[in-house]
Amino acid sequence: YQRRVRGHLLRLKMNRKLRRMGLSPQVLKQIEKKKFLTCGDLLAKSELDLLYELDLPLDVVRETMLKVSQKITPECKTILELLQSTSLDGSSEDPSRLPTRILPLDEYLRGGIPVGTITEIVGPAGVGKTQFCHALAALACYPTSMGGFGDSCTVAYFDTENAFSSSRLVEIAEAHEPNYFSNEDLLLSVTERVVVHQVNKFSQFIQILEGSEDGNSLEEMIIDRNIKLILVDSVASLVRTEFDNSEIYKRQNLLTRAAAKLKYY
């Protein structure tokens, strides 16, 4: 399973759009003129091929290949750097954890839900998983000084069971920070930054993750709206409604695709 996920991740990184790589307008114009749209299109070519096809100086070609390679390669960190980046109080400007405000859980998780990873929340029906997702959505929208991701961040909330409640989200936000949210404009700002997607089929969910032919995808939404947290409540619901026990292979295939795409984001 992990090998399949890593394989999907590699393909997804190679499929990232070159226009998102921070290349200069002049270089990007030459690249797009030759129909190179993704990182894979570019990196599949040798220096000599690109020198001939793009009609750019060798130093520009090398710099472009290096920049694109670095963008899609995960940054290496030492154990010390990882420990130093762990914020136990969630107060840094770029927090490595999203505090849950449940003290024993935050202590166990070294400060909260880790960013840049997939976290699966499991438990029997009625235990409070949906309420926990509501709480995380509200907490993510708090200022960085209060453990959130800042005033400009947005949360993407995929509701597969029609269980999302906007009034409950407001209640949770007010209960956690009553003094801060005594200002109604601040409370309204939180509700404006939680984008809810009603999803009823796994195929619909995959289409949003991978993008449609018109270019509308979660990747575009992440960039345009500054999405910092993606919540899916719940993947299990989509699986239960579409697949029975005779379709385990197909189900696992789709779950692998979804996990790889989410990890990529």
Image (cartoon, rainbow, N blue to C red):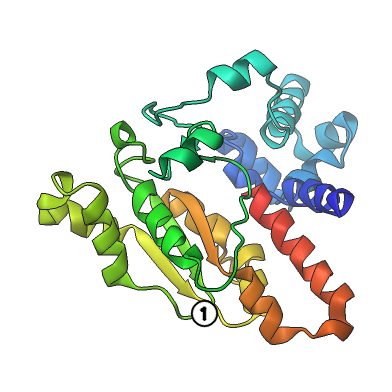
Residue 34 x %, y %: 74, 49
- Using the rendered view, name the quadrant where residue 103 is placed: top left
Q: Disc 1 residue type?
A: Glu
Q: Is residue 212 visible?
A: no
Which residue does the image show at 54% across and 40% down from the upper left?
115
Q: Is residue 139 visible?
A: yes
Residue 12 x %, y %: 74, 52
Front in this rendered view, residue 74 or 200: 200
| 180 over 233 or under it: above or below | above
Residue 17 x %, y %: 65, 49
Q: Quadrant of the N terminus?
A: bottom right
Instruction: Name the secondary structure under disc 1.
Output: loop
Horizontally, residue 52 falls left or right of residue 29, namely right
Horizontally, residue 80 falls left or right of residue 148, namely right
- Using the rendered view, name the quadrant where residue 190 is placed: bottom left
| 143 over 257 or under it: above or below | above
| 196 over 85 or under it: above or below | below
Residue 170 x %, y %: 25, 62
Which residue is tagged 1? 161
Horizontally, residue 177 falls left or right of residue 253, namely left
Front in this rendered view, residue 27 or 45: 45
